[in-house]
Image (cartoon, rainbow, N blue to C red):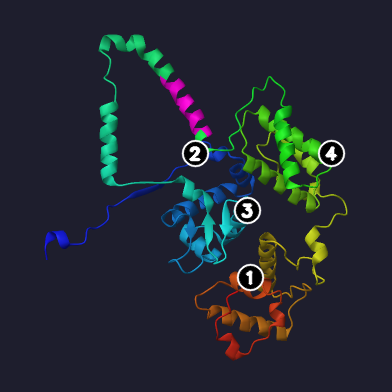
Amino acid sequence: MSKHSQTIKPAKRFIWIKLQYDFFYRDDIRIIESLPNGKDYIIFYLKLMLKAINDNGKLMFKDTIPYTPEMLASITNTSIDTVRVAIDAFAKLGLITLLDDGALLMQEVQKLVGSETPDAERKRIARAKQNTPLKLPRQDKKRTLSGHLSEKVTLENRDKRLDNRTNNPSYIPQRNTSTSDSGIAGVWLEHIKNLSCNFTDTEISAIADFANYKASTGESVTSQQINLILEILLEHKESGYEICRMIKHSIASGYKAVMTPTKDFLIAGALKPNQAKGKYPALEYITPESNTQKRELANYLENCYLRKLNPKTKSPLNADELACIALHKKRQSKSSPYIGWYDYIYRNEVLTGVCLLDQPLDSADASTKPVAV
């Protein structure tokens, strides 16, 4: 066989993630970081992005099996509770998307991935050396050092501004804080109108105050970030929290984002919307309408079954119910491909709308794999 007929191996490539210099100052990242154990969530998010760079941001084990929370916890060396809370927060903020095939899509990865072959790296370094200006004679160094550094800093600042305008189509230039900031608040109010948010006049006024506060700190906010902040505030309002007081406390405390609500901000006598939609005596057993509510229900169900409680009434399981759950766990343990107990509950109870206690199994059924939904 001739040398020319041999298969030529593809050149090795180095692949990396290119984070923007303001990554840790973005509103969505700051919101995550402000949560309890927020720094763990950020580290977990970066690990997921690095894991997804070889598949254009898609996370799927061997291209066929969706990652379960248990699998993600194992491969990223992260606690299972951190994984579940973090995935929920990332989905709310639009950092990840759950695809129909069960895969997780990291949208940012496609924009931030860079790659280079070793040969290209050598050529780039060689070109950089050729373009390096000649060093000044020793007698001129002292005289020109200050001016040279000043010019370098000016050019770097200019390049950063140009980079922001080029890479961020929603870039909002920083305004002079000495002038009126009513235009900044107007941008936020326009977003409220476009999203059809049912905020009251008092709440809109508080949001405008927060917009002016953000502008006074010298931060730029993208259109996507404004929409996400408004959606989060609307969720807090619909969950029975007094968002006007939350905004005022956030501004007074100098927070970078609107604070995470606590029970102190619950409106007296208010019930969360999903509590009114439950069909069982236990208010936590909700009828989910969104992906977030589905995950909340799955977490509640898993906790009840681990504590041997009936999720519909929160009373201890009787002998028949214990036997039913034992058969379901046996069926889950023999599933192929294997899925964890949480995912079994999610697929067979949350998505079907039928309680596991109302799905009796016999020994033969328990030996078969669960039906994928």
> Between residues 4 and 175, which one lies in front from this camera angle?
4
Mark 2 crowdedness (10 Å alpha carbons): few <14, some 14-19, many ≥20? few
Residue 336 visible at all: yes
Going 72% across and 65% down the picture, which residue do you hit? Answer: 288
Quadrant in the rendering for residue 124: top left
The amino acid marked with disc number 4 is Thr
Residue 58 horizontal/vertical position (percent): 49, 58
User: Along the polypeptide, which appears first: circle 4 or circle 2?
Assistant: 2
For the C terminus, the image quarter is bottom right
Q: On the image, numbered disc 3 is attached to which residue?
A: 89
Q: On the image, numbered disc 4 is attached to which residue?
A: 202
Going 81% across and 52% down the picture, which residue do you hit? Answer: 240
Residue 192 horizontal/vertical position (percent): 74, 42
Residue 136 horizontal/vertical position (percent): 28, 15
Badge 1 marks a residue whose secondary structure is helix
For the N terminus, the image quarter is bottom left
How far is the residue under mark 4 from the one under mark 3? 28 Å
How far is the residue under mark 4 from the one under mark 2? 36 Å
Residue 55 horizontal/vertical position (percent): 43, 57
Badge 2 marks a residue whose secondary structure is loop
Going 29% across and 41% down the picture, which residue do you hit? Answer: 121
- 4 or 3: mark nearer the eye: 4
The amino acid marked with disc number 3 is Ala
How far is the residue under mark 3 from the one under mark 1? 18 Å
User: Along the polypeptide, which appears first: circle 3 or circle 2?
Assistant: 2
The amino acid marked with disc number 1 is Tyr
Residue 346: image tag: 1
**Residue at the farthest left position:** 2
Q: On the image, numbered disc 2 is attached to which residue?
A: 20
The magenta span reads 152-165
How far is the residue under mark 3 from the one under mark 2? 21 Å
